[in-house]
Amino acid sequence: MKSRYRMLLGAIVAALAAVALAAPFAQADTPAKGYERFAGCPSQKEKPSVEVCLRSVIKSGNFKMGNKNVPITNQITLSGGVNGSLGGFVANSKGGLTPVKQQVPGGVIGLTGLDWLVNFLGVEALKLYAVTELVGEPVVGEGITLPLRVHLINPVLGNNCYVGSAANPVKLNLIEGTTSPPPPNKPISGKAPEFGFDEATEVLSFKNGKYVDNSFAAPGASGCTLTLFGFIPVPLNGAVNLASGLPAAAGTNETVQNIDIELAPVTRVYP
């Protein structure tokens, strides 16, 4: 049971990342009554390889790179399906992982140090958001390795301001145990989720799991450009890096993610 439990956890955390690369199906069947929350899972008619439907919610946490710590205040919901080996994640048109904006404390002025922007922009326009995106395949082993980039969103920064890329990603290794980071970070610990099973619905649940990593490095920003008067480009990578403490070496960054997970047989979701 313990090894099966570990397999479930590993496969689902990997699926959280892999969904960003999965192409959704054009149409979606309708789940049975009581299973509506699994609507993002393809039926076996849509995708014969699917045997298990899943729904996962990242409820809270934080993502710190350099000296910027972004709280996860907006929940991220994932729904889709996996095969009998709990791999091969796919989603239909109702599923997947929609990018969710998390507000960055300090806004664009705090990120760039350009105080004069307040004279040209209103308070709303100064807000800054971060969206985490997958830029490669996850690796499931002793931990879950996720190659990511963070999209920084504000009109001042242009449309292509990122920390990390496919060639130079932010590599996370999320674990539920205790980390062994390089200094100056100290070890932090995750927490195994609470297991539950509803016999009436055959839904497995893994609730209140805590996944952590504070051993990853963060590269510098790229593609951040302010366009003055609609045609004069002003590179901001240097300003963003200076104000944010980027690039940041391993042992100076941290992420904590609190996750709830549910699994259901596809034959119950689509009888």
Image (spheres, rainbow, N blue to C red):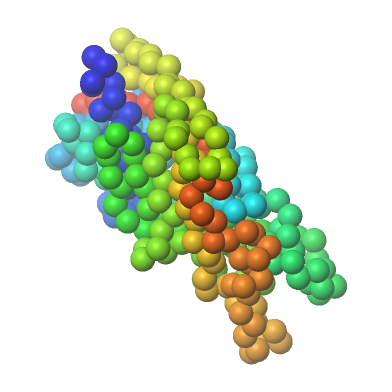
Q: Nearer the viewer, residue 177 or 203?
A: 177
Q: Is residue 114 left or right of residue 30?
A: right
Instruction: Tell me what residue is drawn at x 68 percent, y 63 percent.
Output: 243
Q: Is residue 160 left or right of residue 145?
A: right
Q: Residue furthest right?
A: 119
Q: Nearer the viewer, residue 241 or 79?
A: 241
Give the residue at x 64% y 82%.
Answer: 234
Specify the farthest residue to the top.
199
Q: Position of residue 207 (x, y in %)?
A: 45, 22
The quadrant of the picture occupied by the N terminus is top left
- x then y, percent, for residue 7: 25, 28
- When the figure is inspected, residue 256 is found, relative to residue 23, above or below; the finding is above
**Residue that protrudes farthest toward the bottom in the picture:** 231
Vertical side of 207 occupied by 184: above or below:
below
Viewer-proximal residue, 11 or 200?
11
**Does any portion of residue 95 appear in the rendered image?**
no
Check the picture and name the quadrant holding the C terminus. Answer: top left
Q: For this view, does 38 lie left or right of residue 189?
A: left
Residue ranking furthest to the left: 48
Q: Nearer the viewer, residue 136 or 122?
A: 136
Q: Quadrant of residue 123?
A: bottom right
Residue that appears at 54% across and 66% down: 221
Residue 174 image point, x, y percent: 41, 38
- All told, the count of numbered labels is 0
Q: Vertical placement of 133 versus 174: above or below?
A: below
Residue 265 in view (yes/no): yes
In the rendering, at what x and y percent does residue 84 appear? 16, 31
Q: Residue at x 51, y 46 (%)?
A: 251
